[in-house]
Image (cartoon, grey):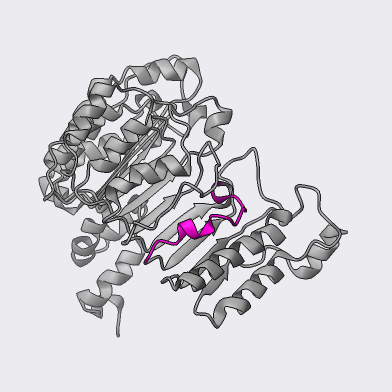
């Protein structure tokens, strides 16, 4: 009788692999008890993607118990350390209802630091810090001192020599960019780090800090920089962009909710400022994605004619505006894909069905015609349009179904070698007509 155990390892391993959720491996732990063969295959998978919760205020919570148990296991069984490839460390908790206001236990920074020391094959490291607005919780979080974070950040490049992605997210907790820089400046161009992803860079830092960073320009190994909720000055951003030897991809977003919350950036960023800063890496940048900025001044100061390696450009509609006078500025000499995002990453404002009308259609038409006239390399225009299922503003009785406009654009430029693609309809044309009535 043929059973699953009759399969060779090269067939059995993928089957067992599919049974282990990325960050819920503990659910598959019973499989390791089936037999020795299952144990040999499953054990590395159980420790491949690890997630720990280091919020001491959640003392009795199941996630804290798992974190402490994992720490004990890896401390006593060193053979397990080699298996980890991705590590997620969270200070803070999404389980605010489980917090005991009388419990002021510190965050368990020592566990995070130990695991970063031990799990030497880790390629992806995610560090998240969240503080609730509740005063008791904030006092609890403060018991984990900035020095704990400094040690954690400094330990990562020393111990994780295979680290390719470093993601640090701090919400309602100031991120000290100078501290982070001092922790990572030991990395030379030969290190494995490729992606630096930061959310919540605060206004903390001085001109002396940025001079120190600029003195290390052209030394960092990462090739992709992702920034969100960046409230520092243009000088700090410039130093950060100049830091890597070769920056190939840049992502930047300042959701408008930052400004509603009063968390203003020290610089009123616009596309002109961004172009000046990115020019330091114009010889290598191949992908630029800028979603939201405070100042929406259009593209007149965003001339990309000197960005010869730029192949993909992603901008939001709010940034570009819908004026067509300077649309040719976006056409870098070798640009192949342009992505136009109609969405707003913000709960205070959203796009309705009127979000893609005649002005938007004419803007895309102007971009495509400019490309044809200049004989550029543009091959694809991607329109991201995910409206609410209703109108959010005033509409004209002659308002057309948005996807009819996009179909027309695709048909008009198909023969010219430009592929216009777009999000599938949110509602049918019949529903649209009923909604308009």
Dominant secondary-structure state across the stretch colored magenta: loop
Q: Where is residue 76 in the image (x, y as percent from the top left)?
A: 13, 40
Q: Is residue 332 magenta?
A: yes
Q: Is residue 50 left or right of residue 332?
A: left
In the foreground, 161 or 116: 161
Q: In this rendering, does residue 109 appear at all? A: no
Q: In this rendering, does residue 141 appear at all? A: yes
Q: Is residue 305 left or right of residue 215?
A: right
Task: Decide: is 239 above or below 78.
Answer: above
* Start-end of magenta stretch: 319-333
- The structure residue drawn at horizontal position 71% and vertical position 71%, both measured from the top left corner, is 404
Quadrant location, the N terminus = bottom left
In the foreground, 221 or 378: 378
Quadrant location, the C terminus = bottom right
In the foreground, 369 or 160: 369
- Residue sticking out furthest to the bottom: 1
In the foreground, 38 or 127: 127
Q: Does the magenta stretch include residue 88?
A: no
Q: Position of residue 124 (x, y in %)?
A: 26, 49
Quarter residue 140 falls in:
top left
């Amino acid at each position: 009788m043929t059973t699953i155990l009759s399969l060779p390892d090269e067939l059995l391993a993928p089957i067992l692999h599919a049974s282990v959720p990325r960050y819920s491996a503990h659910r598959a732990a019973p499989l390791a008890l089936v037999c020795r063969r299952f144990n040999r295959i499953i054990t590395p998978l159980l420790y491949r993607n690890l997630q720990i919760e280091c919020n001491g205020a959640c003392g009795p919570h199941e996630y804290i118990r798992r974190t402490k148990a994992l720490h004990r296991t890896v401390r006593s069984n060193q053979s397990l350390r080699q298996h980890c490839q991705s590590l997620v460390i969270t200070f803070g908790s999404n389980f605010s209802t489980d917090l005991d206001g009388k419990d002021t236990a510190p965050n368990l920074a020592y566990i995070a630091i130990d695991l970063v020391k031990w799990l030497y094959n880790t390629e992806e490291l995610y560090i998240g810090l969240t503080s609730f607005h509740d005063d008791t919780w904030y006092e609890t979080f403060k018991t984990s001192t900035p020095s704990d974070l400094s040690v954690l950040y400094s330990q990562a490049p020393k111990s994780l020599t295979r680290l390719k992605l470093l993601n640090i997210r701090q919400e309602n907790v100031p991120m000290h960019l100078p501290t982070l820089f001092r922790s990572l400046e030991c990395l030379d161009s030969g290190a494995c780090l490729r992606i630096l992803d930061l959310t919540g860079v605060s206004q903390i830092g001085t001109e002396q800090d940025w001079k120190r960073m600029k003195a290390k320009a052209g030394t960092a190994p990462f090739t992709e920089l992702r920034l969100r909720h960046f409230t520092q000055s243009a000088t700090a951003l410039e130093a950060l962009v100049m830091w890597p030897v070769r920056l190939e991809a840049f992502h930047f977003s300042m959701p408008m909710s930052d400004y509603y919350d009063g968390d203003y950036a020290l610089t009123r960023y616009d596309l002109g400022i961004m172009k000046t800063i990115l020019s330091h890496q114009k010889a290598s940048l191949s992908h630029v994605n800028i979603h939201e900025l405070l100042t929406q001044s259009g593209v007149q100061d965003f001339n990309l004619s000197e960005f010869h390696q730029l192949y993909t450009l992603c901008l939001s509609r709010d940034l570009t505006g819908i004026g067509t006078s300077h649309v040719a500025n976006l056409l870098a000499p070798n640009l192949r894909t342009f992505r136009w995002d109609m969405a707003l990453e913000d709960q205070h404002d959203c796009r309705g069905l009127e979000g893609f009308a005649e002005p938007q259609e004419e803007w895309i038409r102007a971009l495509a015609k400019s490309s044809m006239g200049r004989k550029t390399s543009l091959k694809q225009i991607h329109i991201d349009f995910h409206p609410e299922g209703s109108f959010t503003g005033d509409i004209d009785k002659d308002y057309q179904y948005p996807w009819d406009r996009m179909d027309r654009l695709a048909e008009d430029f198909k023969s010219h070698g430009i592929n216009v693609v777009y999000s599938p309809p949110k509602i049918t044309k019949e529903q649209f007509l009923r909604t308009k009535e």
